[in-house]
Amino acid sequence: GLPRLVREIAGQARAHLREARSQRGAVPKLALPALWPASLAEDYLKRLARAGYDPLSEVRSRPATLAPLKLLACRALGTF
């Protein structure tokens, strides 16, 4: 039952991320750094899906080695 619950929560997280990105133009530039971690959340959700939504899986628990580069790209592009 846990993977089913995690899948539902992940789906809600994806929906919130899509909604936030649809409002991207309304976000003041000074507030963008607070939203950069959203790009990391997207990667985490993808890894979680590959692990069958098992929150205890090794695939999920691996560190995001490219996270600093992803955050730098968000900064350079002014996006999240």
Image (cartoon, helix red, strand yellow):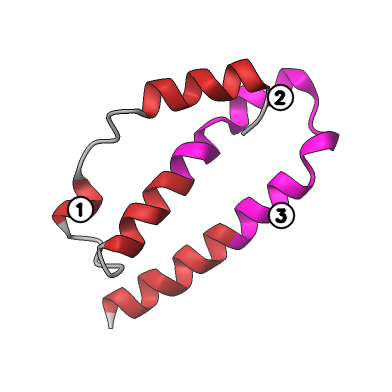
Q: Amino acid at mark 1?
A: Val
Q: Earlier in the sequence, mark 3 or mark 1?
A: 3
Residue, x 46% and y 45% (percent of image)?
Answer: 41
Pointer 3 residue? 19
Find the distance from the CA under tag 2 to the CA under tag 3: 16 Å
Q: Secondary structure at mark 2?
A: helix
Q: Which residues are magenta?
A: 15-41
* Extreme residue in the left direction: 58
Q: Relative to residue 65, is residue 47 depicted above or below? A: below
- Which kind of residue does numbered mark 3 sit on? Glu
Q: Are marks 3 and 1 in contact (CB under 8 Å)?
A: no
- The residue singled out by tag 2 in the image is 31
Mark 2 / mark 3, whichever is N-terminal: 3
**Image coordinates for residue 27, horizontal then vertical, percent:** 79, 32
Count neighbours of disc 3 (C-alpha within 10 A) and say few if under 14, some if 14 to 19, many if 20 or more. few
Residue 76 as seen in the image, left or right of residue 51: right
